[in-house]
Structure formats: structure tokens, C-alpha cells
Amino acid sequence: DQQVKQNSPSLSVQEGRISILNCDYTNSMFDYFLWYKKYPAEGPTFLISISSIKDKNEDGRFTVFLNKSAKHLSLHIVPSQPGDSAVYFCAARLNQAGTALIFGKGTTLSVSS
Amino acid sequence: GAVVSQHPSWVICKSGTSVKIECRSLDFQATTMFWYRQFPKQSLMLMATSNEGSKATYEQGVEKDKFLINHASLTLSTLTVTSAHPEDSSFYICSASLTTQGTEAFFGQGTRLTVV
């Protein structure tokens, strides 16, 4: 049973527009959420994170929103650039020291110029 | 950010042989490292948690005798795929956290294993 779900396997956006990637989770014990970007045959690269006590975190073009009551978070990228084309993974961490991240299946973002 | 180096980045081996993958934290000490496996178009699935100086903790369904993990120092963890078979072909990724809380995990480049 997947605890972190990314229901959209792919998303296509035009350059300059907003990209919205969604993630849902089932475990209310998650206390930290992270977004990673991944290119083929490479390890994931950290993008942005949010603590469960916050509802928004912004870093440049990237903003993550958390809705705890809905167990939903989203990553907004604006404006989208062709270089943003990659697979984006949502990950969550249990409120427990030394635990691994639990990942969603990823969403492939394609930004066309 | 912190750097995690994984080696080799790709390897092809014959069925029945063993392959060792190294994961090093280059500029920090990692008491805990994690090993993941990714099949095409699938999520990163946690295989095991590697703790320095103690036995690794394996996830359900992962054979500990097949995937040997050694975390002998604070900067190095190794994953050995023993008696590899074609179904073990996959992308293996390690990660390490700066603190035991692991609020941000840093990942190695990954290792593409192909067993022929």
C-alpha cells in the first residue's frame, strides 16, 4: 500500500507557464515532506522541503504548499523553463530519528519552448 | 549541499557473479545511509537502512543474504549483490543524511546494474 502517491505520471507545460505537481499521502505521522528532481541514470537532487507545521515554503521559482487536513501537497514552478523537464519525486519522512524517506512514483514534467 | 559519491555508475556482470557498490559521504559523516532500488518508471524503493558499526535493517521482501550491506566507517557503506541474476538488474541508489533526523537526504549518482 503506497503511503505517498503521485497520481499524475506526466505533465506537459509551456515555457513561462506554471507547473503544478501534486502529491497525496496517507500517513499522518509524516512530519517532513521533500521534493526531488531526477534525470535518467542520475541520483535525485533535492529541490525544496516543508515541515508539517507549515503550509507554505518558497524558494525562488519553487513553492511547496501543504494541506494537512487533506493530506495533500503540491509543488509550483513558475515560470517553468525547458531545463525543468525531469522526473519529480515527492517524498515524506516519519517523525522518527534515522528513518528513510518514502517516495512517490514520480511525475515526469515536460516543459516545451 | 553535501556530497554523496557512488561507485561504479554502471556495471555489467555475468549471472552468478557478485557485484559491490560503494557509497561514500565526501564532506560529512553519515551514521546512517540508505539503499534504494528503482525499476523503470517506478518509485525509489527502500531496500535497507545501513547503520555504522551495526547490522543493516532490511525492508520486508529484501533478502539480506543476497544484498549484503557493510557500513564499516562513518563515510562508507557498501552494497554487495551476491550471485547476481538478470532479475537483479536495476538502478541502485544510496543516500545519506547530515543528521540522524535526516531532514534532508543527499543521494549518490546511482549505479545501473545489468546482469547478463
Image: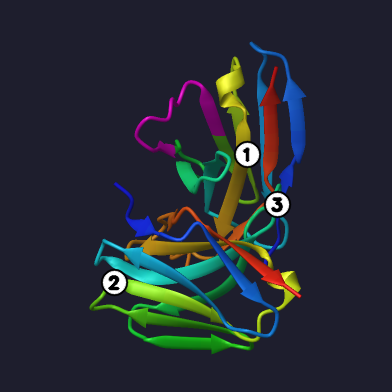
Q: Is residue A35 above or below residue B85?
A: below
Q: How many marks?
A: 3
Q: Amino acid at mark 2?
A: Lys
Secondary element under disc 2, as helix, strand or loop, is loop
Q: Which residue is mark 2?
A: A71
The amino acid beneath tag 1 is Phe
The Cα–Cα distance between marks 1 and 3, rounded to whole angstroms, is 9 Å
Give the residue furthest to the top: B16
The residue pinned by badge 3 equals A42
Tell me the chain of label 3: A
Q: Earlier in the sequence, mark 3 or mark 2?
A: 3
Give me the residue at 53% from left, 54% from top: B31
Q: CA distance from mark 3 to mark 2?
A: 29 Å
Residue A87 locus on image (x, y percent): 60, 59
Q: Residues within 10 Å of mark 2 (few under 14, many from 20)?
A: some
Vertical side of A7 occupied by B60: above or below? above
Q: Quadrant of residue A32?
A: bottom left
Q: Bounds of the magenta span?
A: B57-69
Query: Dividing the picture into quarters, in which one does residue B113 lie?
Result: top right
In the picture, the quarter occupied by the N terminus of chain B is bottom right
Residue B9 position in % (x across, y down): 76, 41
Task: Please tell me whether residue A94 belongs to the stretch shown in magenta.
Answer: no
Residue at the location (58% across, 40% down)?
Answer: B40
Q: Residue at x 76, y 75 (%)?
A: A113
Mark 1 falls on what kind of element?
strand
Q: Secondary structure at mark 3?
A: loop
**Is there one chain holding both mark 2 and mark 1?**
no
Q: Chain of mark 2?
A: A
The residue wearing badge 1 is B91
The residue nearer to you, when weighing B82 against B69, is B82
